[in-house]
Image (cartoon, helix red, strand yellow):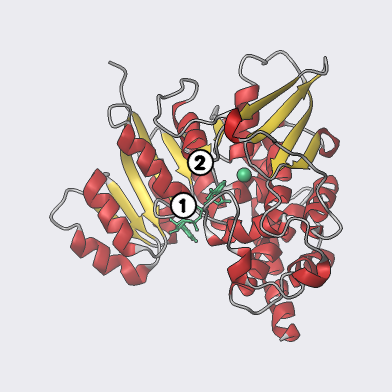
Amino acid sequence: MMSKKRIAILGSTGSIGTQALDVIEANLDTFSLEVITAQTSATLLIAQARKFLPKEVVIGNKDFYDQVKAALSDLPIKVYTGSSALVSVVESDSVDVVLTAMVGYAGLLPTIHAIKAGKDIALANKETLVVAGELIMGLAKAHDVNIYPVDSEHSAIFQCLAGEEHNPIEKIILTASGGPFRGKDRSLLASVKKEQALKHPNWSMGAKITIDSATLMNKGLEVIEAKWLFNLTASQIEVIVHPQSIVHSLVQFEDGSIKAQLGLPDMKLPIQYALHYPQRLKSDFPRFSFMDYPSLTFEKPDMETFRNLAIAYHVLEKGGNAACIINAANEIAVDAFLHDRVGFLEISDVILETLEKVDFIPNPGYDDYVQTNEAARRYASEMIQVKI
Ligand code: NAD
Ligand code: MG
């Protein structure tokens, strides 16, 4: 019998984290869960720990440590707290693969530590590659570590590339659902509220990525993520809107042939493909039928209304720390939108102005990213404060 793959899930209480636990639960003879972490969701983290009995559990926020520690005191589980524990727990000898399912810039440092410890990465946290793609891909190469994409579009491309190792990519086509506001104009978008933006037509996800999907920033971040994962230039990455979210993305080769990966939208598929690559696991997920979808449709993204996608292409061309700047500004602006402190269209204003104001660094190292992230957050927050 093959030994089990030993998994750490960073952000186990979120949308990706809980679906990854569903995958593990359905394949207990294939996976063992060694480490789980969360920031504040103590009750769910405790329930997960009692069910799966991982060796180590981290609750990031210290206010919840006593609660988690007490609730698990009858079990042989080590409980830690604080940001340094969130980072170092990935280095555990008992871990083979680290699933990065935490949200935002906070994913960067734990991912760096996991790579340096020689762990393969199942990468959901796209912000890590957006902020520091060059650094991360360089480290992965140096430490001979694999990065398996979890994002459904990138998983689709990765699946299309199986067996194509010697065939260069001509271009990739990332599909976008278009989000809840597809086809809407600026006058309508000026007054939309978080309740409308949080209603994604096809996917149920965490709050930040759901807003990013409504502004098309999610697709912008995915363009940058794709650049680093598949070593492409901006002109090799096309985005098309596909409202049914059935074709998860496509690859075009140099002979003109296009391969696509299709299926009903369900993140458990890319999660288990990443965790168990290269072997596919049997699943009982609902199957796609063409008869249920007599028309799959495709259209051009509206980058004038949804400026974030254009901004992402711009920073991809610009390079350096530009993507780190817009990622930080976006995190601040999305949080402000979720607290009714900026309007939907102002999210792009905050990002653009922050990009102008924060110093550009052409060849950043890790410390530059830390400083850029802080400076961009500070600037974006101040700007939002002045506006209200
Ligand atoms: P979520 O908000 O549902 O969950 C986030 C998880 O991260 C929670 O467990 C939370 O406790 C933890 N967390 C939050 N802040 C943290 C911090 N500062 N440090 C450590 N942990 C922290 O988010 P999600 O929708 O599951 O998304 C997670 C990541 O996966 C994001 O980067 C997102 O872009 C990416 N992703 C998600 C989906 C999806 O379907 N949800 C699809 C593709 C990619
Ligand atoms: Mg995606």
Residue type of the residue flagged with mark 1: Ser
Dividing the picture into quarters, in which one does residue 352 lie?
bottom right
User: Looking at the rendering, in which quadrant would you find the C terminus?
Assistant: bottom right
Secondary structure beneath dot 1 equals helix
Work out whether residue 108 or residue 160 is closer to the camera in this orientation and state it: 160
Q: Which mark is residue 15?
A: 1
Marks 1 and 2, Cα distance to the nearest angstrom?
9 Å
- Picture residue at 23% right of the left edge, 47% below the top: 51
Whole-percent x and y of residue 146? 54, 29
Q: Which mark is residue 49?
A: none
Instruction: Identify which residue is drawn at 65% across, 42% down.
Output: 244
Q: Quadrant of the N terminus?
A: top left
Q: Is mark 2 within 8 Å of ligand 1?
A: yes
Residue 365 place in picture, x, y as percent: 69, 49
Query: Along the polypeptide, which appears first: circle 1 or circle 2?
Result: 1
Measuring from the top left, give residue 100's x and y in whole percent: 49, 45
Is 3 on the left-hand or right-hand side of 245?
Answer: left
Question: Does ligand 1 reach within 8 Å of label 1's beta carbon?
Answer: yes
- Let me know if residue 94 appears in the view: no
Mark seen at residue 267: 2
* Residue situated in front as seen by the camera: 140 or 316: 316
The structure residue drawn at horizontal position 61% and vertical position 48%, both measured from the top left corner, is 128
Amino acid type assigned to the residue bearing label 2 in the image: Met
Q: 265 above or below 188?
A: above
